[in-house]
Image (cartoon, coloured by chain):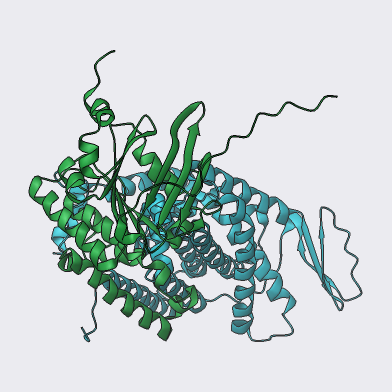
Chain colours: A cyan, B green
Amino acid sequence: MKKLRLNKTSRTNFLTYGMVVVLFVVLQIMSGGGMLSSTMKGQLVPICAYVVMALSLNLTVGVLGELSLGHAGFMSVGAFAGAVTAAALQNAIPSGGLRLAVAMIIGALFAAVAGVLIGIPVLRLRGDYLAIVTLAFGEIIKSIINNLYIGMDAGGLHASLINNTIVLEEGGRMILSGPMGIPGITKISTFTAGFILIMLSLVIIFNLVNSRAGRAIMALRDNRIAAESVGINVTQYKMMAFVTSAALAGAAGTLFAMGQNTIIASKFDFNQSILILVFVVLGGQGRMWGSIIAAAALTILPELLRGFADYRMLVYAIVLILVMLATNNPTLSGFFSRLFGRFRKPQKGDAAR
Amino acid sequence: MSAPKREPTKLVPVPSTNKIPERDIGRSPVLECRHLGIDFGGLTAVKDFDMAIGRTEIAGLIGPNGAGKTTVFNLLTKVYQPTRGTILLDGVDTHNMNTAQVNMAGIARTFQNIRLFDNLSVEDNVKLGLHNYIDYGMWSGIFRLPSYWKAEKAAHNQAMELLSIFHMEDMANAKAGSLPYGAQRRLEILRALATGPKLLLLDEPAAGMNPSETAELMENIVKIRDQFQIAVLLIEHDMSLVMGICEGICVLDFGQIIAKGTPEEIQNDPAVIKAYLGGRKE
């Protein structure tokens, strides 16, 4: 018993960590050796942000088992809170890396608070109802930020809703101006920062899932009535999963924002939420390595399809359909499992009843 | 204005005249229900359910299909809130508790249609029963602090010990959903037992078992009672099991108690025979 015991779950977790590290090193070498085009280089930070988004949504959808259609809302909260923080601290913290870290923490905190506020009403609902209400909250967040004005002068930060009535002292400047968003962002997000955030998210998610709290969350997913019957507080654990997921999405939002020149609230709309959900479903619910690959592949794909010009989104949709069909095909997955010589236990569906 | 007409108040006896085994008389009953009842819309599903269970009693709840037996379990565990009546668990009124709180107060149950955490391992299912005894927070879990390792190791040992009751240690890493039917039923009992109950509710534990499996189950229920010194209330249609191990039996028909007593008394009760076999039209 003293020996380090590696069960199937921890093996998968270590392989996932390994995969991320290898991908990072390979891409780092490729970009250093000039083997990546400048558009691809520009995609590295967004890819990392979307990977973290997919991982965090997978915590809600795959582990907690609740469908959320407003995940871009948390990304938005994190993006704007983080970008405002970074802009405000521009002179106070000269080091870009440190400023990014502080901005990410603030972004995650704001998103977590939004997660708590939204979670209180939303988590009382179940299934389809919960999904639709999260969708509505995503839109509310978008509208609020669309009407939010934040300026900074010697006196500190000034915020205003609905109208731009902020009067700034001399030398002050507007950071966020409603529908115009935040222009002129100093890009401080780096691929390395993205890599660190992915690794951190993986550690948080894997360790949470393989702990007392994670077991309770998965128990709720598998059978809520039975979970209550063994004394598990449903609201507490639903909230824990939802808020952790929101906080990670907030950090990802900051990472994303700090890699752009300009961010506007309407970028984080319903389509964005659905796109993230597509990553999760394509990669497999509860399967973190699947989310990573799906998020990375589907973020690069539109760039690779530039050759198709006007037909780009059509081809994208067709590729998506084909991949979905292929990954859900038992014959194909059986073929791959034989190919890799992995022993797979019979699935629930094909067991004789 | 004239004073509103008042119905005369009906007085009901409290505490009850319910019976418990003589050996448990030194301590108050673990469970005592008075006038427990629930209506669904206009339908009265359970009415005036009175019952007391001794500290180490194995009690039975029987009755024809649709009599309201599982509804009683759902009332005791607060899956449904009772419309009328009180439930005293170890002397404590469970009126304001929810399902999780009732479990922490001391009632654990199994389900008629098995409800395991199918995608989790057998060991994790038992550990979920131990959930409220595992003492570390979310952050210790995320950062893998020493308290995590210590508590998880203790939980592992405890889970293995519980699994050994039914000789299921070698299945610990299997998915609960992949177990054969009988093993799933046994695992559900262990998960309930892990929550450290004072009263264990078993909803048709022998359903789908053959006679030899049922005999083994009977032995195990008695063994669990003796080892953990807890009370057991079971719903069962298998009369060999009910008459074999139950000390006090309560018969329910159309939501009402029609007979209470020892197995011998129940077997000879005309009302019970009528409920099961149908009576002659007068």
**Residue A350 seen in the current view:** no
Residue A126 at x, y = what percent?
Answer: 49, 45
Drawn side of residue B81 relative to residue B150, left or right: right
Of residue A80 and residue B37, the one placed in the foreground of this image is: B37
Q: With respect to residue B171, does A302 lie above or below?
A: above
Q: With respect to residue A155, does A57 lie above or below?
A: above
Drawn side of residue A257 relative to residue A321, left or right: right
Residue B125 at x, y = what percent?
Answer: 30, 62
x 62%, y 50%: residue: A137
The quadrant in which residue A290 appears is: bottom left
Residue B237 at x, y = what percent?
Answer: 22, 39
Of residue A227 and residue B16, the one placed in the foreground of this image is: B16
Q: Which quadrant: the N terminus of chain A?
A: bottom left
Q: Which quadrant: the C terminus of chain A?
A: top left
- Work out which residue is located at the far left of the displayed protein and give it: B212
x 45%, y 69%: residue: A37
Q: With respect to residue A260, does B93 lie above or below?
A: above
x 29%, y 13%: residue: B282
Residue A347 at x, y = what percent?
Answer: 20, 52
How many numbered markers are drawn?
0
Of residue A177 and residue B64, the one placed in the foreground of this image is: B64
**Residue B65 seen in the current view:** yes
Of residue A233 and residue A10, the one placed in the foreground of this image is: A233
